[in-house]
Image (cartoon, grey):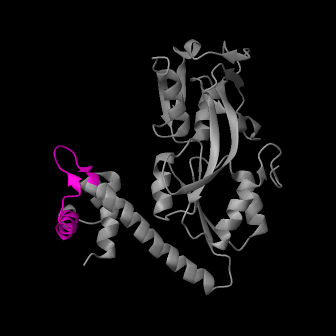
Amino acid sequence: MMELNSLKQFLVVARLEHLSRAADELHIAQPSLSRTIARLEGELGTPLFERSGRLRLNDAGKLFRDHVERALGELAAGRRAVAEATSEGLGTVRLASETFLTLTGPLAAYKRAHPSVEIELHWSLAEDMARRLRAQDVDLCVASQPIHAEGLESTQLFDEAVGVGTPLDHPLAGRTSVSIDELADQPFITAREGHWIRRLLDRLFAARNLTPKIVCESDEPSAIADLISVGLGIGLVPAFARRSPTRAPGAWIAVDSPDCRRTVTLYWGADSHLSTAARLMRTTITNWDWITGDPQEKR
């Protein structure tokens, strides 16, 4: 009979597709993890991974992974539902996003309105969000790029232009717009692969058979802004960031491309049981006025 711990370990191996890294994350010995995977494959009567070269989840493994994610997610949801039903509180809400700079307004308003609710914030790449929602590892996700996956519901929060940020004394700083071709030889400071800004940058350049000249990759948005402002390079900057009271000094130039935009969307599992706290958070975020920064009904 399959054990819960074995299924959880399988999901880590399926996500990383690497036994030693999975063993490190799980804090167990690799031979023990290998035996667990072999035992699961024996019970199912089929391999779950391709083992020629690097470890790869095969079709049977992908099918099994999807069912395990849903099963463990339902079990976790059941535990939360019982805890909510037997307590006087509103429960806990778990929100994942690629960036929380965009969400500081609605999060602050939510916390003021519901001070007893425990809020868990999880940084996540968009490519991991569907899996986390299916597994009910998080309740809500805010992504700056589309998530193409079944079993999700969503609502668009806002759509905005993404421009180029430069230091104030940069030759482009006085321009009202700039083309991608004009940016081909410019040094870019950007996020690591997988982040929505990096994906947008790569996509814009690839559409013109160009490759961006990247001189710095960082996981810190504030560091990217500071490095741009002191003249170490330029970078893509969403219009929303221009309204931040703590933003670094610099110029913002529109990009002459209809594709240089981001669409911010809130996602949740179509069949997930959302706690009262999560439903209230969903309402707060969807009703937020992203122009004025006020918690009012969307028109």
Any part of residue 124 in sight: yes
Q: In the rendered image, which quarter is residue 244 located in?
A: top right
In the rendered structure, the answer to whether residue 266 lies left or right of residue 27 reads: right
- Residue at left offset 52%, top offset 41%: 219
In this rendered view, identify the residue nearer to me: 66 or 293. Answer: 66
In the rendered structure, the answer to whether residue 211 lies left or right of residue 80 reads: left
- Residue at left offset 30%, top offset 63%: 10
Q: Is residue 41 magenta?
A: yes
Q: So how many labels did they put on this image?
A: 0
In this rendered view, identify the residue nearer to me: 37 or 236. Answer: 37
The answer to whether residue 61 is above or below residue 199 is below
In the rendered structure, the answer to whether residue 214 lies left or right of residue 67 reads: right
Q: Is residue 273 magenta?
A: no
Q: Which residues are magenta?
A: 33-59
Any part of residue 212 in sight: no
- Residue at left offset 50%, top offset 57%: 151
Q: Residue 218: percent from the left, percent from the top?
A: 51, 37
The answer to whether residue 235 is above or below residue 65 is above
The quadrant of the image that shows the N terminus is bottom left
- Residue at left offset 71%, top offset 26%: 250
Q: Residue 53: percent from the left, percent from the top?
A: 17, 43
Q: In the rendered image, which quarter is residue 158 located in?
A: top right
Q: Residue 235: percent from the left, percent from the top?
A: 59, 27
The answer to whether residue 115 is above or below residue 296 is below
Q: Residue 233: percent from the left, percent from the top?
A: 57, 23
In this rendered view, identify the residue nearer to me: 105 or 258. Answer: 258
